[in-house]
Amino acid sequence: MAAMTHVFPTYDRFGFEPVSGQGVTITDETGKQYLDFTSGIGVCNLGYQHPAVTQAVSDQLAKMWHISNLYNNHLQESVAHLLVGDSDRLAFFANSGTEANEAALKLARKATGRSQIVSFNHSFHGRTYGSMSMTGNLHIKEGFGPLVPDMVFETLNDPAAFKAVGPQTAAVIVEVIQGEGGVILADRQWLLDLQDKAHQVGALLIIDEVQTGIGRTGTRFAFEGVGLDPDIYTSAKGLANGLPVGAMIGKSALKSAFGPGSHGSTFAGNPLTMAAAQAVLTTLTPAFLAEVTQKADQIWPVLASFEDLPAVTAVTGRGLMIGIHLAATVPVSEVISTLHEKGLLTLSAVGNTLRLLPPLVMSSADLQRGLSLIESVLKAV
Ligand SMILES: *Cc1c(COP(=O)(O)O)cnc(C)c1O
């Protein structure tokens, strides 16, 4: 395809166009096939043309794809119920991760009557003003000021961060694993202590599960694996396997701050996207999640052995969320391009990190095949 000349150049694009996908395989405009280690960016966790999702969306397409939030919507109620289970929580639907985090920010400020948000360096929460202002990656915010005020940034995994959380704090927002920031894990005990500190001072704990959620780390949400009990958590990316859906889930005690007219969205929660989300959440059974963990357990010894390669400084992650940290002499963009030539799609993240987010439905054999390709490329550089 010719270069894209009529679109703002906000994305640094690779020079080929994927045009179809089936299972875990993507085909480009020349007919070349790729094994997918990206899932979009953690979106198509169930791969491409997953039968249950495709069926649900095409059935709903024939009935109705949009109706406003002025009316009851049984699919929203069903997806909300699937999300919260029997916990005492409620959902608000949005169209993206950044919007889910905007909703979390608004709810936290309104419910507590406080304004300060404590966030972390290198975090990523989205591109709209509120979410961008909560984002710890300075590059994302450059040139866009003034930002939303009263945001404080601390260092992940540093107990000194707890000092910033006080009676002025509305909420603390954190990713269990920083995704865009380089697949950096927050320590389990540090997260539990952070939650304790927030609750001691009446601040809310917001967990951004936009990338870590929907089975990516082997549990439905990563906070479940840590044993956290967040006041609010947000989901998007994988929630509808590619249709635009975000969700903010909060404790029922916050209900009165989000009454009629307090927040809303024209498109959010429409029947088409909800049909997709319902199919995704119905597919994400305990047996499915156990299989994800089993496949992850098989590949992590292989990944750990990559740390012996001179091109690799460390391998981090959990489940099927993987960061291979490369030596400064091995630019991640070159590794990604070489892998494209060899028929494998991968991602990068901050810090010269090769990021892998394969579809959760990928077989062990395909996971091993992709890792062998990566190993051969990392050995040759
Ligand atoms: C991708 C991402 C977002 C933003 O989601 P969008 O749908 O692009 O707005 C927010 N938080 C995290 C952790 C993400 O990975």
Image (spheres, rainbow, N blue to C red):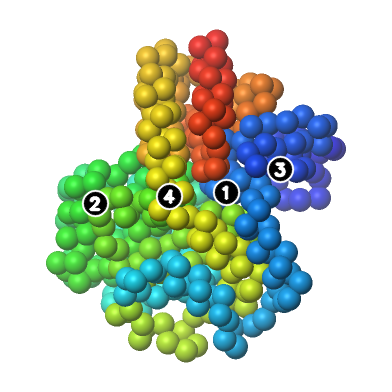
| Alpha carbon separation for disc pair 4 and 2 | 27 Å
Nearer mark to the viewer, of 4 and 2:
4
CB atoms at circles 2 and 3 under 8 Å apart? no
**Residue in view at x 41 percent, y 19 percent:** 306
- Which residue extends farthest top? 380
Tag on residue 191? 2
CB atoms at circles 1 and 3 under 8 Å apart? no
Q: Please state, as top left, top right, bottom left or bottom right, where the N terminus lies in the image.
A: top right
Q: Is mark 1 within 8 Å of ligand 1?
A: no
Name the quadrant containing residue 108.
Answer: bottom left
Q: Amino acid at mark 2?
A: Leu
Q: Amino acid at mark 4?
A: Ala
Nearer mark to the viewer, of 4 and 1:
4
Nearer mark to the viewer, of 2 and 3:
3
State the image coordinates of residue 102 (x, y, percent, origin top left): 46, 67
Q: Give the vertical position of 204 relative to 2 (above or below).
A: below
Q: Earlier in the sequence, mark 1 or mark 2?
A: 1
Mark 4 element type = helix
Q: Earlier in the sequence, mark 4 or mark 1?
A: 1
Q: Earlier in the sequence, mark 4 or mark 3?
A: 3
State the image coordinates of residue 143 (x, y, percent, origin top left): 53, 52
Q: Amino acid at mark 3?
A: Gly
Query: What residue does disc 4 label?
Result: 287
State the image coordinates of residue 78 (x, y, percent, origin top left): 51, 74
Question: Taking 34 as reference, is 237 left or right?
Answer: left
**Residue in view at x 50 percent, y 88 percent:** 261
Query: What residue does disc 3 label?
Result: 21
The reply to whether residue 9 is in sight is yes
Query: What residue does disc 1 label?
Result: 46
Mark 3 element type = strand
